[in-house]
Amino acid sequence: MREPIIVYVRRRLNEFKGIWPRIRDATKVEYNTIAKIAQGVRTNPTLSTVQPILDWFEAKDKERPQKQPKRSRKKTN
């Protein structure tokens, strides 16, 4: 089962808790709204509120280098 969008947004906001002011500046979503969503006070924000935050997460994910799967080494005897 997929994670509900609001649960995903709340979880990701809490991952970025120290930089909510930067999220506010980049998304134009009010800081108090970001905090209320992250704290579970706003349980049903509008799409126009959530979409810029989701877009910001996507941009941040593209900035991070992707983890490469570990290659297994074959032992030679």
Image (cartoon, rainbow, N blue to C red):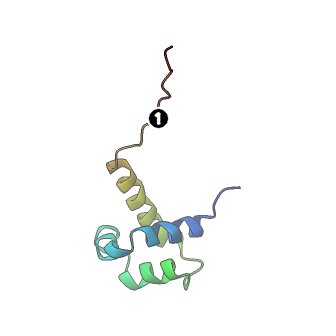
Dividing the picture into quarters, in which one does residue 13 lie? bottom left
* Residue at figure coordinates x 47%, y 29% from the top left: 71
**Which one is in front, 14 or 49?**
14
**Which one is in front, 5 or 71?**
71
Dividing the picture into quarters, in which one does residue 41 lie? bottom right
The residue to which callout 1 is attached is: 70
Q: Where is residue 75 in the image (x, y as percent from the top left)?
A: 50, 20
Residue 28 visible, this orientation: no
Q: Where is residue 26 in the image (x, y as percent from the top left)?
A: 30, 67
Q: In this view, does 60 lie to the left or right of 51?
A: left
* Residue at figure coordinates x 52%, y 68% from the top left: 11
Residue 50 visible, this orientation: yes
Compared to 44, does 61 lie above or below? above
Q: Position of residue 54 (x, y in %)?
A: 45, 61
**Which one is in front, 6 or 28?**
6
- Residue furthest to the right in view is 1
Amino acid of disc 1: Lys
* Residue at figure coordinates x 35%, y 68% from the top left: 27
**Label 1 neighbourhood size at 10 Å, few (<14), some (14-19), many (20+)?**
few
Q: Where is residue 38 in the image (x, y as percent from the top left)?
A: 49, 77
Which quadrant of the rendered structure holds the N terminus?
bottom right
* Residue at figure coordinates x 46%, y 35% from the top left: 70
Compared to 32, does 67 lie above or below? above
**Which one is in front, 62 or 75?**
75
SS state under label 1: loop
